[in-house]
Image (cartoon, rainbow, N blue to C red):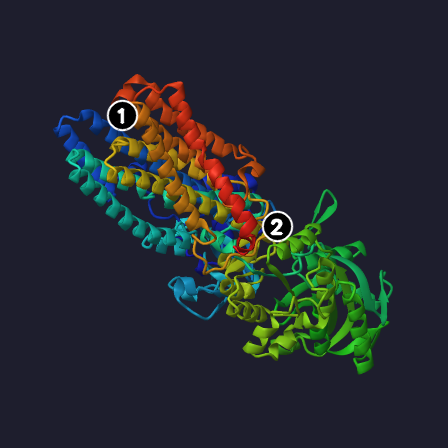
Amino acid sequence: MQQSFNFHSKSIEEVIENLKTSPNGLAFDEAEQRLKLYGKNIIEEGKKKSIFSLFVEQFKNVMVLVLIAAAIISIFLGEAADAAIIIAVLIINAVFGVAQELKAEKAIEALKKLNMPYAKVYRNGHLMQIKTDELVVGDIVEIEAGDIVPADLRLVESYNLKIDESALTGESIPVEKDANAILDQSSPIAERTNMAFMGTVVTYGRAKGVVVATGMKTEIGKIANFVNIQSNIETKTPLHEKLEEIGKYLTVGILAIAFIVFITGVLYKRDVFEMFLTAVSLAVAAIPEGLPAIVTIVLAIGVQKMARRNAIIRRLSSIETLGRVEVICTDKTGTLTQNKMNVVKIYCNDNLSDNLDLEDTTTKILFRIMALCNDVKMELIDKQPKFIGDPTETALVKFAYEKGLNKNAIEKVMKRVYEIPFDSTRKMMTTVHEVKNDQNLVVFSKGAVDVIIDKCRFIMIKDEILPLDEKAINKILQANKEMSSNALRVLAFAYKEIDETQLQNKNTIEDNLIFVGLVGMIDPPRKEAYDAVKVCYDAGILPVMITGDHKDTALAIAKDLKIIDTNKAENLQVLTGTEIEKLDHETLKEKVKEVRVYARVSPEHKLRIVKAWKDHGKIVAMTGDGVNDAPALKAADIGVGMGITGTDVTKSVSDIILADDNFATIVAAVEEGRKIYDNIRKAIQFLLSSNIGEVVTLFLATLLNWTVLYPIHILWVNLVTDTFPALALGVEKAESDVMKRKPKKSSENIFAGGLGFSILYQGLLKGLITLLVFFIGSKFYDTKVAITMTFMTLSLIQLTHAYNVRSNINSLFKMGVFSNKYLNLAFIASFALQTVVLVVPQLREIFRLAVLSFTQWTIVILASISIIPIVEVVKYITRHFFVDEHKGN
């Protein structure tokens, strides 16, 4: 294979020969060898930071630098032990910080792999889907409207293909492509009409191409050598930004308190250097610098859990919005229904029937249109047909096959020579075929009933072509209504014969068609959709169905799933696309409050519906699968792309991709989003209440001129009691009422719902209990024992309190005290680290601690667990006197 081969200036045959491939694609083993030889088809990002760089960054903090300076001063003053402990704590803290960042990075990398798009490729002559990063030079790839081109391609077949190359060339108008063009070697990229480039978007038509370059060898890859193209998966979310803002205010407040502690200690004539260390240690311990990293880890772990439930989150920030969703606008086909279409009714020859045989010309033509006017691929595997394509088209091809019409066999006799692809705005598709041994061409069309009728001037009944008069139209519409009222999806079929000269005028191909018949298909609701709709209403979320299907079909499914409010008039809850067209924005804005079903809508209508809901201040999720759905998905607070039927474009603009195209998965994702947001709040509550507890302890102790802890104690307690329990709270199971609460408002502060109050009173409580233990210790024992008891209490009370934080409203005992196994392990690990300095004589000496007696341990343990019954009483009062407020949160 020649690296400098100008593919755009060579014929298709020369390109195929040069790349040592064939129209049937590469063999599996050859593709595997090429992947090993040339590497994956990915755009490389900038160099990642080394572990050493991450480690060094942990020390780029003013407080940490002050501690390092303090350690150096300690060495000069002969306090080597103090210096060693400070440095050891800083190193351990840095290691924890690096571990957190690596874990977050690893989780995000896993998310990127989950988000990897797929390409349709031929291997050994079989069409299959593979991840785009597995594409190699020589692969034969299929692309169609809505796809993002997965690599640089030399087109070998093209049908009305147009590609938006603005991302590469800046050209705003989609470029028409022609596989048969052979261009001059010097043709610039923007004029290479026989090429398709990685990262560009197919806006119209379809094509087949051979991969000529992958990864960094592609045109966009060459640009990436100069500009680092970042992933659109964000590591910093709005929540991070809020926390950073809160952190700034906390830092100022804590530094002020640390300064007061230092000045007060000096005024009490305590050792200046020790008070300086105490103040700095307090500031370092009290500022929650690890909180953003913990939030990232919790979000990323949650994302992977969602992926296991078939919801692939493309942006971490989406999780925050998910838990607040108030309206879910969902497609019907494949999302609320099974997406397994079966033909069950046919209207043909002025007759509505459950079954038809190939008895006459009209029926034969109808079945031929069903078999040929589509993009379904049919393969025989072990003599059994396998259909690849759109579910609706697959149902038609399958039905025709069962009636004896093999799509592959008919295509040999009736080769497709032209097509006008399906478009959600036109709502129809047309193919033109040349008939073997016949001078004429035949036009086959299928689409929405009203659209096809409008294109027809004649009707074929029992081999006779008659004018399509009002009486015939009424019969067709009556048959359509009867099928639609039974929740059938109805398509109309028509044809006409033309000669080659008529094909030249593309604008008239679909005019003056001959109506042949209607086909009714059923796509029953998914079983899980029934429960999902109920859960939505329980959770204060409004499910809204938006579909391109007929009004009667949509209404029948909506009634079955109980999306329709039975207490209100049906006609007020259904709106069609035609009716939307007649409404101005203000009228539509009022209408959406009542409407539960939108039928016969276009993507433009979806955008209007989203904007109308957002004008009410609602958080809206919107599903979509077609390229034209992209604006509505981008406009929604949460854009939901379909993983199976969705185009690459809709997936690329989506916040969430449903791997199973299932409505129940959206609801499950909302539940997971609420749980993750709750858990982040729990981690925040735990960390901030612990930090406030430390501040209260030292601040009040300094004012009382008590030496309750040494600087190293504060650093150590902060080190061993923060990380593990906070992460364990981040994976807490969802509370039983998580989907029985109203959605949180987007304007709601993160400390709303009593969280701020809980942090303050619980932090104060911890500080006071710790000081009480010191008071008892100093009253009955010596100072060294009292300080040891205080040190152990401050640590143990924080670990014990982590169990309280599992719910801010529900009783710990009702939830099961030890039901979070990760928190149990975190407690054991942190408590072991805490007690090791007391048990090991050398460490005990360095930390200036005493051995505690059974009685002293009893006081420490009782004081530490006393916070549980106190918080339980507050929870009880909240549940019984502030229930309504809780439900509103």
Give the x, y percent position of residue 678. Answer: 49, 47
Give the x, y percent position of residue 587. Answer: 58, 77
**Near-viewer residue (766 or 2):** 766
Q: Which residue is denoted by mark 1 in the rendering?
A: 783
Q: Which residue is denoted by mark 2 in the rendering?
A: 660
Name the kind of residue labelled 1 in the image: Thr
Taking the spot 42% from the left edge, 33% from the top edge, the residue there is 799
| Sequence order check, earlier mark of 2 and 1 | 2
Residue density around tag 2, few if under 14, some if 14–19, many if 20 or more, within 10 Å: some
Q: What element carries label 2?
A: loop
Name the kind of residue labelled 2 in the image: Asp
Taking the spot 35% from the left edge, 20% from the top edge, the residue there is 852
Residue 718 figure quarter: top left
Count the marks. 2
Give the x, y percent position of residue 62. Answer: 23, 44
Tell me if I can see residue 806 in this picture: no
Residue furthest top in the image: 841
* In contact (CB < 8 Å): disc 2 and disc 1: no
Relative vertical location of residue 758 with respect to residue 410 in this rendering, above or below: above
Taking the spot 32% from the left edge, 37% from the top edge, the residue there is 51
